[in-house]
Amino acid sequence: MGKTIIQKIFENHSKQSANVGDIIDIDIDVRVARDFGGVNVVKNLEQNNLTLDDPKKTFFTLDCNPSGSDQKYATNQHICRIFARKNNVKIFDINSGIGTHIMIDEGIAKPGDTFVSTDSHANILGAIGVFGQGMGDKDIAHAFAYGNVWFKVPPTIKILLKGRPSKLASPKDVALKLLQEFGANGLLGYAAEIYGDYADLLPLDARITIASMATEMGGIIIFFPLKKRITADSDANYEAVVDIDIEGLKPLISLPGHPENVLNINKLDKIKIDSGFIGSCTNGRISDMRAAAKALKGRKIAAGRVLKIVPSTDKIWKKCLDEGLIKIFKETGALVGSAGCAGCAAGQIGQTGTGEIAISSGNRNFVGKQGKGDTYLASPETVAASLIAGFITTVDNIPKEPASQNIPEASHRISEIKKDVIISRLTNAEGKAWVIKKDNIDTDMIFHNRYLSITDINEMGQYTFDNLKGYENFSKSAKPGDIIIAGKNFGAGSSRQQAVDCFKSLKISVIIAESFGAIYERNAINSAMPILSAKDITSKIEQGDELKVDYTTGKIINKTKNKEIIVKPFSKSQLEIYKLGGILKK
């Protein structure tokens, strides 16, 4: 039986066969930490007296807050700089841009390589046939120190793009079409390979756009095969083959709160907007800047609106300058920021205020992800056209006169502080159930990105779920030992370790969900936070039930109802890491 792309790359970086479902150690060619995750990587290394496996394969990218506008971000960045100096590590500082893009453009990560980063969109590297994976700080610290990390070999889905989109549709619209088809967890736990005449003709920038949104579908990675370089075997075994019809595809839009909630723009009423953002790792390339400039040239942004534009790297920024794009942006009234991630990690520009309606070319629009407003996702062309019109529209439907403005309302809340963390090494737990009957609870709902500069676990608990509607007061009500019961894809979204550690801060004993986001699952296991997967668990347990859970047998005793549930217990690896107190406690 032949091998898929991910199996071939894994076997080239391991002494083991890469059979689907196996857990194997993979050598990592390129290891990266960013500004908010980097300081925790440094802390993990220093606290465990670990040295670097190979400084030449190790990098820092300070791309989340290029301006260092937050004092804690600035401190974290400086800690990374000092560590880099001491250990002869290359650092791409705040003047460089998004790390994943730098790795591609500088040729640091090459087709067939393995790449890990504290960036949850490290799977962008699938655009050039590199296995890229976003990870939490313990995983990255392990890669820094030992040169490898463990992976569970995922099954692969083959995606066939059928037909050609309309002239108005961009690669971002194709990515949104995939989201519409697969939903927030349709690729959960899978790698994917994309084929078809359209896919074969896509340039690098377009492949980056589509590959970057694998995370929003729950996927491990989306690969674009590179003929004669990175391909699957002709007899490779796929979990499924999925046809996606893109014939005549027209511009799409993702509604606020859920990237997968996608529909045709022409189905929307003229929704007024207050601001727009063009950039991110999904749409910050030179082709995106050119497309935006083409729509904006000779026009003005609608009165009272704000357009923020952030190229993904400094080299692209300079190209924009050389080609006169910056001049177009400024003449139309846009704010142009330094190269980097912008709003996604609460850094630099791109945040929204309470009541603000925004349209963005980014990859996420989770509630609160980029501030207090509501964010629609679309292509750079659509964002540009909408800012001229003052309402959501496409480049072929820009009116002569813009729409009037919105007037949002403002509000805020303050959480109380809880401290002290006690981690038990018992292999069982007893506590009251918190049943959250929601799927796709993302990391911004669990621990919002505005708190990412917090590195002290004792401070994290107070912010748990304060961005999850209906559970804003969870941190005040939860008791030590309580057990969380949740739906599918718990912990979807970014690679932040804080979304795990906040539960440890509150002394939550175990999280039982129908399934977990791929990165979140790793982070929990590696930091010895007990988690269990259990099918239909939210329908079997009610709020407040008293439970007794055994991690080694998977037995859940509902003491309130005098019933027993059997779920999959800890794997051997998970149990070993848990008993050690974390993956770095070897």
Image: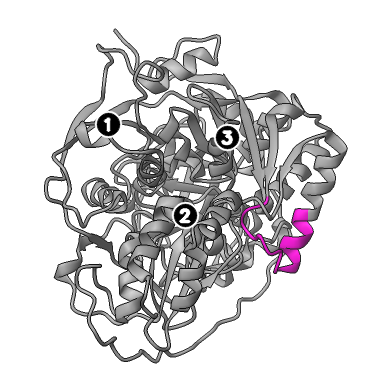
- Position of residue 154 measured from the top left corner of the image (x, y, whole percent): 39, 27
Which image quadrant is residue 464 in?
A: bottom right
Q: Mark 1: which secondary structure?
A: helix
Q: Mark 2: which secondary structure?
A: loop
Q: Residue at 60% of width from left, 52% of height from top?
A: 314
Considering the image in quadrants, where does the C terminus appear? Answer: top right
Location of mark 3 (residue): 116
**As shown in the figure, which amino acid type bears the numbered disc 3?**
Val
Location of mark 2 (residue): 284
Q: Is residue 93 visible?
A: yes
**As shown in the figure, which amino acid type bears the numbered disc 2?**
Gly
Location of mark 1 (residue): 200
Q: Mark 3: which secondary structure?
A: strand
Question: Residue lying furthest right in this view?
Answer: 86
Q: Residue at 40% of width from left, 44% of height from top?
A: 205
Is residue 287 positioned above or below 534 on the image?
below
Q: Is residue 351 visible?
A: no
- Position of residue 518 measured from the top left corner of the image (x, y, whole percent): 45, 40
Q: Label 2 neighbourhood size at 10 Å, few (<14), some (14-19), many (20+)?
A: many
- Left or right, 4 with respect to 348, comes to left
> Rounded to the nearest whole Å, what is the CA distance between mark 2 and mark 3?
21 Å
